[in-house]
Amino acid sequence: QMLSQIDCLAVQNDTDGQRFIELGMPVDNMTVTGSIKFDITIKESLLEQGNQWRGQWGEARKVIMVASTHQGEDSIALNAFKQLPREVQSQNPLLIVVPRHPERFDSVAKLITDQELKLVRRSELINANQVNLKTCQVLLVDSMGELMEFLAASDVCIMGGSFVENGGHNPLEPAALKVPVLMGPSQFNFALICQQLEEAGGLKTLEESGLLAELSRWLLTENIIAEKGLQAKQVVDSNMGAKQKVFELIEQQLA
């Protein structure tokens, strides 16, 4: 009864559309627009900020971002980082850890120092000259709203919420910045998007036990990160436009 009263329904994909039809949605009142999550605008200022960060900690370093982590995922990433092959370690890689929830900042900081890794906290960088970022091993982003600029300075993204049963967080944010994604098996929040990225080559799904080997392969294989990053970006670019389609549907209804 409720669905029959809807004049216009915009859905992300054919799979969702079919589900609505099975629930009784009139086909003529439904349009597949694609997902507005693909409509990510990357401003030049964001890329410039990313370049500034890289300049501070060393442009030649490999930078691994662990984004939006939940309890248990920080240790997974730290263990993999500490076990990277000697060839990678000799290049002084940097791990950026971004916990999902602010109340975990202090406990994650302790976890890092307990691993005897050289830690710098984002909150210590009010004056960047106070801390030598080129010697730190782990940067803890204990701030809010800065995820994208640190992604813009990264080579690889390990996406949080996916190595615990939380459904994963948005892999399109790194993809839009040409940063390829390593992701755990829990992906129900972005199932179709992850599938699209993986089929294109810009995302790799793996268990915790496979993280070290795949991360090492990416860091040691020449050009693979750039190639996979471009494949991820192409998925974003080819699926843009949903927001404009929604605007047009609204205009038609108002007319």
Image (cartoon, helix red, strand yellow):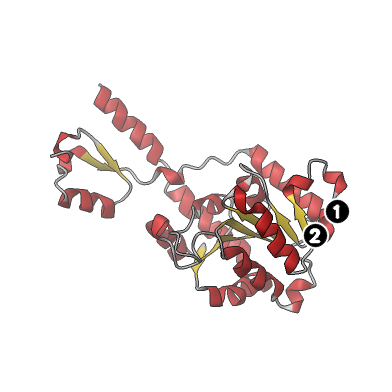
Question: What's the residue at 68%, 73% (across, down)?
Answer: 220
Residue denoted by label 2: 136
Question: What's the residue at 59%, 50% (across, down)?
Answer: 177
Q: Position of residue 24 (x, y in %)?
A: 14, 46
Q: Nearer the viewer, residue 48 or 191?
A: 191
Circle 1: is it few (<14), some (14-19), or many (20+) Cα within 10 Å? few
Could you say which quadrant of the image residue 37 lies in?
Answer: top left
In this view, 160 is above or below 144: below
Circle 2: is it few (<14), some (14-19), or many (20+) Cα within 10 Å? some
User: Which label was assigned to residue 140?
Assistant: none
Quadrant assignment for the N terminus: top left
Could you say which quadrant of the image residue 104 lies in?
Answer: bottom right
Q: Nearer the viewer, residue 248 or 8?
A: 8
Q: Nearer the viewer, residue 130 or 221?
A: 130
In this view, 63 is above or below 27: below
The type of residue carrying mark 1 is: Asn
Residue denoted by label 1: 132
As helix, strand or loop, the secondary structure at mark 2 comes to loop
Q: Position of residue 90 (x, y in %)?
A: 80, 72
Give the alpha-carbon distance from disc 2 to disc 1, as whole Å: 7 Å
Is residue 154 something that shows in the picture?
Answer: no
Q: Position of residue 32 (x, y in %)?
A: 28, 45
Q: Nearer the viewer, residue 130 or 154?
A: 130
Does the residue at mark 2 contact the one at mark 1 (Cβ under 8 Å)?
yes
172 vs 115, left or right, is left
